[in-house]
Amino acid sequence: MVSKPPAISAHEHHHRNIQGGAARAAVFGLNDGLVSNVAIVLGMAGAGAGAGVVRLAGLAGLVGGAFSMASGEYGSMKAQAELLEAELAMERVEIQRRPENERRELAAIYRSRGVEPSVADELATQMHRDPDLALETHAREELGIDPNELGSPVKAAVSSFAAFAVGAAIPLVPWFLGSGDAAAIASAVLGALAAVVVGVVLSRFTGRSPLRTAVRYFVLAALAAGVTFLIGNLVGLGAEAVAG
């Protein structure tokens, strides 16, 4: 009896989409908001600031940092997208003006990767029968980009703003419910737990060990909080500035 060939699904490889600008901005925006504001909050707490001062500093850090992250993410992704679009436009013009030169260039790329010359020429000829397919192929093979995955600056900016704000709000919440040492301890605990969660979530994207990634982000957050708390404790604030 002839055995059935193995099902195709058994050999499929599933890859994560690692080029999404919005997802990347959200993950790192959350971490940046958490680390920066836990440092601000505990720095002010270490200086002996009253709850009102800590809340004000924390809110200023949240709003200012969120806008800074969003504008920076938008600007960088917009510039990158415009640069890639300009490269694609130049490539499109070259394909229209010098199709044979571009076809030979594509065939040369295939040959440089070990494809037999005759097969490389046939592949390049097939690709150049459709101008859109030729452009997409040149973009991938020659420029190393996917013209359909340039990223959205607006989505990245919105994701970065929202994620930073959420991360920055975590260590600030206890100061709307309490004050003093209890609020400072609660901020430190919440910040530590959130850093661990960020590390675990990020490990799902990278495939790295959740434990190692979580410990790394915990250490970074703890270091930022500890240094600023120590500085605040050493420098302090005038008594007239800490009332609240």
Image (spheres, rainbow, N blue to C red):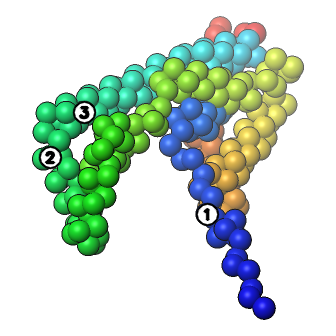
Disc 1 residue crowd, few under 14, some 14–19, many 20+, Cα 10 Å: few
Residue found farthest to the front = 1
Side (left or right) of 155 relative to 48: left
**Quadrant position of the C terminus in the picture:** top right
Give x and y (percent) for residue 174.
Answer: 81, 25
User: Disc 1 residue type?
Assistant: His
Q: Which mark is residue 92?
A: 3
Q: Which mark is residue 13?
A: 1
User: Disc 3 residue type?
Assistant: Arg
Q: Are marks 1 and 2 in contact (CB under 8 Å)?
A: no
Give x and y (percent) for residue 39.
Answer: 61, 33
Q: Secondary structure at mark 3?
A: helix
Question: How far, Cα to Cα, is label 1 from label 3?
Answer: 32 Å
Q: Which mark is residue 161?
A: none
Q: Which mark is residue 100?
A: 2
Disc 3 residue crowd, few under 14, some 14–19, many 20+, Cα 10 Å: many
Pick the front one: 33 or 147: 147
Looking at the rendered image, the disc whose residue lies closer to the viewer, 3 or 2, is: 2
Q: Are marks 3 and 2 in contact (CB under 8 Å)?
A: no
The numbered mark, 1 or 2, whose residue comes first in the sequence reads 1
**Residue 95, placed above or below residue 74:** below
